[in-house]
Amino acid sequence: MSDVKAAITAVGAYVPEDVLTNKMLEDMVDTNDEWITARTGIKERRILKNPGKGSSFLGIKACENLFSKTDTKASEIDLVIFATATPDMPVASSAAYLATEIGAVNAFSFDLQTACSSFLYGMSVASSYIESKKYKNVLLVGADKMSSIIDYEDRSTCIIFGDGGGAVLFQPNQDGYGLQDEILKTDGIGRQFLKIDAGGSILPASEETVKNKQHYVFQDGKTVFKFAVSNMADVSERIMTKNNLTAKDVDWLVAHQANKRIIDATYKRMNLDENKVLMNIQRYGNTTSATLPLLLSDYEKQLKKGDNIIFAAFGGGFSWGSVYLKWAYNS
Ligand code: UT7
């Protein structure tokens, strides 16, 4: 084990101004506020409407917010990891563009895609670079413009997703704060249940794929729900056992905001009190790669140095996991 741990030392976030409420969705598809609230916990989400702007815009704004709160300068960043399932465009790295735009001129950068688990996986990658002592300042950005891949005539998906971005700075810590442990899992069985059929190398874009609406997210919600509930709760419980943590030792659960019922099942399996569960799904919906940093940003003032935090996520692939981290600062 390295004597250096990777600690989060700053957080930033951004959500677009435009709000899409459950009431507004009632005019778009056959749904209602009561159903959405009871089944998902979501009341509203944010939508990026600025023409010509993609996920990098959300990430850049989140980084600007982060740099307004830290002494570290963009030019001191060694590596930028951009966790996103909705890159600005295929092939051209969104991370490269983002890094240049924020002034991280001395950094290299890359995109990381593991659907809704992208940010959680990014935490593992960012930390490994720091623990290996290869790099000192690693910026992990999670942002998704989900509205760019959602069919607003499909009530099974358009009620769930929203746009947003978040960023955290990882730096070396020799006092034991930072990432302690992780359990990361994937299972390719999930590919058929949560996907976009066209636009990839199997089925390139064509007139037909557009006509058939195959560039939008398809989700077999019921199946994904079942896997998400059991697997997210499972790894969260396992990481506690593995690290000899009782419910008393855990200060916060920071769980992917996909469905309030999944988060509830997870904290109950961990035997946690509900007041230890960070929750903002009601305001943003599922922002994919941005849910975890958006939670950290919203609750930053309540997080105290030394707090034990369990992160958990589940997403397409399937991919899922859990991270145990000791918080490193008081804000
Ligand atoms: O972040 C990546 C991972 N993703 C997830 O974790 C999402 C997991 N899945 C879910 O969150 C839930 O499955 C959904 C929120 C997507 C759906 O909730 P559900 O409780 O699984 O509903 P359901 O699909 O089983 O549908 C129940 C009923 C159906 O009607 P019938 O067949 O019982 O008459 C649906 O047609 O609700 C109907 N329904 C709706 N009604 C009103 C489905 N969508 C809607 C809607 N408004 N938007």
Image (spheres, helix red, strand yellow):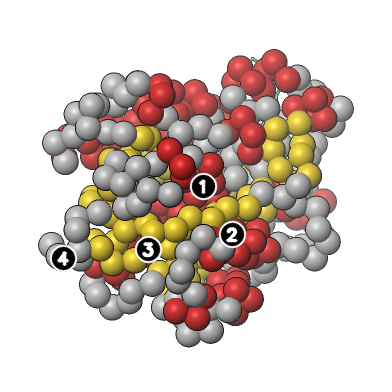
Check disc 4 and give the amino acid type: Ser
Location of residue 7 with respect to 164 vertically, above or below: below
- Of callouts 3 and 4, the N-terminal one: 4
Read off the residue under disc 3: 170
> Badge 1 is on which residue?
297
Disc 1 is placed on an element classified as helix
Question: Residue at (82%, 30%) from the top-left corner?
Answer: 24
Residue 215: x %, y % from top left:
71, 53
Q: Is residue 161 left or right of residue 84?
A: right
Disc 4: CA contacts within 10 A as few (<14), some (14-19) or many (>=20): few
Asked if labels 4 and 3 touch by Cβ distance under 8 angstroms, the answer is no
Give the labeled residue for mark 4: 2
Q: Is residue 316 visible?
A: no
Marks 1 and 2 close (CB-CB < 8 Å): yes
Circles 1 and 3, Cβ within 8 Å, touching? The answer is no
Using the rendered image of the protein, determine whether residue 310 is visible from the camera's viewpoint: yes
Secondary structure beneath dot 2 equals: helix
- Can you give x and y, in whole percent of width and height, for residue 213 in the image? 76, 48
Instruction: Report the residue that reaches farthest toward the bottom.
Output: 106
Whether 243 is drawn above or below 328: the answer is above
**What is the number of the mark on residue 65?**
2
Above or below — where is 255 with respect to 176? above
Q: Earlier in the sequence, mark 2 or mark 3?
A: 2
Which of the marked residues, 1 or 2, is nearer the chain's N terminus?
2
Give the Cα separation between the discs numbered 1 and 4.
28 Å
How many residues crowd around disc 2 within 10 Å: few (fewer than 14), some, or many (20 or more)? some
Question: Type of residue at label 1?
Answer: Ser
- The image shows residue 32, relative to residue 15, as above or below, that is above
For the residue labelled by badge 3, is the local secondary structure a helix, a strand or a loop? strand
**Measuring 13% from the left and 62% from the top, which residue is drawn there?**
1
Separation (CA) of disc 1 from disc 3: 15 Å
